Image (tube, rainbow, N blue to C red):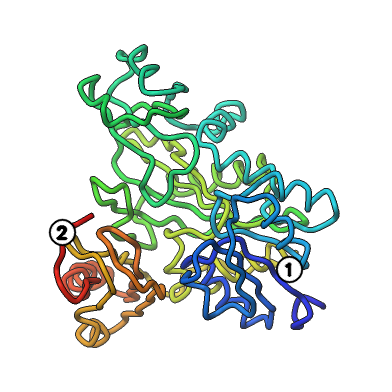
Amino acid sequence: MKAFYKDFKLGILGGGQLGRMLIQACQNFDIHTSVLDPSGNASCQGLANEFHQGAFSDFDTVYNFGKQVDLLTIEIENVNVEALYQLEKEGLAVYPQPRVIEIIQDKRRQKQFYLDNAIPTAEFVLVNNREDIRQHESFLPAFNKIGQGGYDGGGVSKLTSLADLDKAFDAPGLLEKAVEFDCEISVIAGRNVRGDIAVFPIVECVFYPEQYLVDYLISPSLLSEEIQNKAKDIAKDLVTKLDIVGILAVEMFVTSSGEILVNEAAPRPHNSGHQTINANVTSQYEQLLRTILDLPLGSTAINKPSAMVNLLGEEGYTGPVHYAGVNELLAIPGVHLFLYGKAETRPHRKMGHITIVDADRSKLMNKIEQVKQTIKAVSQSKQESL
């Protein structure tokens, strides 16, 4: 099969940490990788077989890049969809498909898709700008989400009342009703060209309250089998209705009454699936390759209970990164360190993650706190946060 020889070229739009870990999976399949990213210092820069610097928001750049590869995928949604449509029209395999990316990259369109296709989600209203929110005072408290461009916790602001209006985005977006929930979960589902679906076990996520970023996650979930099966069924339903080829990470809320509501979805590898590299039979990155190459899907079974802790840039530090506590961290049994190759740190920037595996869940929980206290992403000298 051509995919297992170096004359097969996989194009990846985006050169961040997700692309970096995807490339590592590609090496096992002997796939030639070509990456496009606007930054010359992107995480993938020294790892891809070919690296091209350019804006993946520019039609000509994406189109010309796509003409040089055999198959095109993404590690970020904010890409030029018109170029992808044209490439697809000319016969290039683009997975996930441009129409799926177009739905997901606009939160307004994404939420409307859920509503139109009976996918359970929180109540929402579409808004065009900050002043438009004034007309929906009775809908507050709610989360104001910008329609396009939000990423890694950006583009979300909680509005308790109109007194918070200055925090709102003066751009097309939506208001999503604040939901009382017991926990947040994520489910990653893969679907190949022939329509086979495989779903990873549910993970429970704990978020930083202000940054809307995952602090850590636990796998497997301790939720009831009924709740877990319901969440998996929703993920299967969503990938089927999207008719996606690739993987889809579905973030959900679980309410105290057992209701499950879809928050957002991402048609690519996801932060909530990093632990699969060490803890599952098949990683989310290998599964992505299996889906887009139309190979048999891999087992998603868990080998060992695991946790994943995000390594974020520390408050007050901006500049060339220094990792404090690495030796102490690696002395902890069951710990695996992943650094993303980013030269500069800043507060809350994703600099890496740590996977922990341990058959004893109580020890796993203790190690989460130990890891969080041990390693820090700082710079050589403390500075004011920018």
Measured Cα–Cα span from mark 1 to mark 2? 50 Å
Q: Position of residue 375 (x, y in %)?
A: 22, 75
Q: Nearer the viewer, mark 1 or mark 2?
A: 2
**Residue under numbered circle 2:** 384
Q: Position of residue 193 (x, y in %)?
A: 76, 57
* Residue nearest the viewer, comparing 106 with 37: 37
* Residue nearest the viewer, comparing 300 with 341: 341
Q: At numbered mark 1, what does the secondary structure look like: helix, strand or loop?
A: loop
**Amino acid at dot 2:** Glu
**Residue under numbered circle 1:** 295
The residue positioned 24% from the left and 65% from the top of the image is: 318
The residue positioned 85% from the left and 55% from the top of the image is: 91
Instruction: Give whichever of discs 1 and 2 has the lower sequence position.
Output: 1
The residue lying furthest to the right in this view is 90
Q: Is residue 105 left or right of residue 271?
A: right
Q: Position of residue 140 (x, y in %)?
A: 29, 21
Categorize mark 2 by other alpha carbons within 10 Å: few (<14), some (14-19), many (20+): few
| Quadrant assignment for the N terminus | bottom right
The residue positioned 27% from the left and 31% from the top of the image is: 167
Q: Quadrant of residue 143?
A: top left
The residue positioned 52% from the left and 68% from the top of the image is: 301
Q: Position of residue 186 (x, y in %)?
A: 44, 51
When the figure is inspected, residue 255 is found, relative to residue 23, above or below; the finding is above
Q: Quadrant of residue 52?
A: bottom right
**Amino acid at dot 1:** Leu
Number of callouts in the render? 2
Q: Is residue 359 left or right of residue 34?
A: left
Categorize mark 1 by other alpha carbons within 10 Å: few (<14), some (14-19), many (20+): some
Q: Is residue 196 left or right of residue 2?
A: left
| Quadrant assignment for the C terminus | bottom left
